[in-house]
Image (spheres, rainbow, N blue to C red):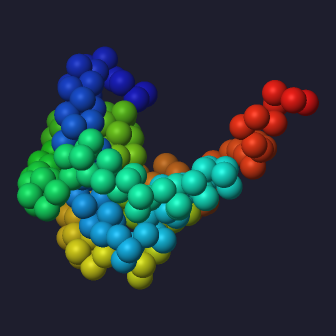
Amino acid sequence: MLYPKEVEDKIHTFEDDLGSRLGATLRCFAYNYLIDLPNYHEVLVKVSTHDTSKVEQVLFDKMLDKGIDKGMRKNMGIRQSSSDVSEQELIKLFAEVSDMLVGDYIMDTESKSYGFTAADLAFASLAYPLIRPPCMKDFLGDPKDLPQKVNEFSEQLIATKAGQHALGIYKKHRGSEHVKVKSGKRNKYPWEGLFG
């Protein structure tokens, strides 16, 4: 059960906390290094347009360094100082989750095991860009193409109890099968349906 009654409110609070402390924070940290154009132009296009139409891929590729990069930085508050704060917040959060892991799962206590809950699912789902589970590799850039700082930080987080837990969630509950997004006809022109 994803939301056992006894800890349902605690799980919802944890999920809300992760939304701001992990999701947005991780993006700020990673994008700060990936928007270092032209050094990481190709990998940013690949990661950002994975499983989009060819038209969207081409447009993003052509427009990335013509304003999208500056817009991302401005609208998401991405700069070196916010990235540094994000890095420290991620270290703190992974330490807190590591401390919560007294059993096999996040909501487990010393006296009761709740098993796999939405808390584990939320944490693993939001952490995947930096913990890099093998089954999600199609959604991530190849580590050899990523900034050294991102790779080093990923290794630091993976080495924590929380990082190992997130990887274990993918291995145990997702398996080794690579995740593929189902898609239909993606390479249609936007106006194609209007004149059919």
Where's the C terminus, which quadrant? Answer: top right
**Residue appearing at x 69%, y 45% in the figure:** 182
Where's the N terminus, which quadrant? Answer: top left
Q: Out of 76 and 9, give the one closest to the viewer.
A: 76
Q: Out of 180 and 1, give the one closest to the viewer.
A: 180
Q: Out of 161 and 24, give the one closest to the viewer.
A: 24
**Residue appearing at x 23%, y 19% in the figure:** 9
Extreme residue toward the right, this view: 196
What x and y, as percent, mark residue 110?
16, 41
**Residue appearing at x 72%, y 37% in the figure:** 190
Disc tally is 0
What x and y, as percent, mark residue 5?
31, 17
Residue 142 position (above or below residue 68): below
Residue 176 position (above or below residue 187): below
What x and y, as percent, mark residue 67?
38, 53
Displayed quadrant of residue 138: bottom right
Residue 68 position (above or below residue 117): below
Extreme residue toward the bottom, this view: 144
Q: Is residue 83 left or right of residue 155?
A: left
**Residue appearing at x 22%, y 70% in the figure:** 153
Q: Is residue 155 visible?
A: no
Extreme residue toward the front, this view: 66
Displayed quadrant of residue 132: bottom left
Q: Is residue 55 visible?
A: yes
Q: Out of 62 and 31, give the one closest to the viewer.
A: 62
What x and y, as percent, mark residue 26?
26, 52
Q: Is residue 18 left or right of residue 172?
A: left
Q: Is residue 186 left or right of residue 60?
A: right
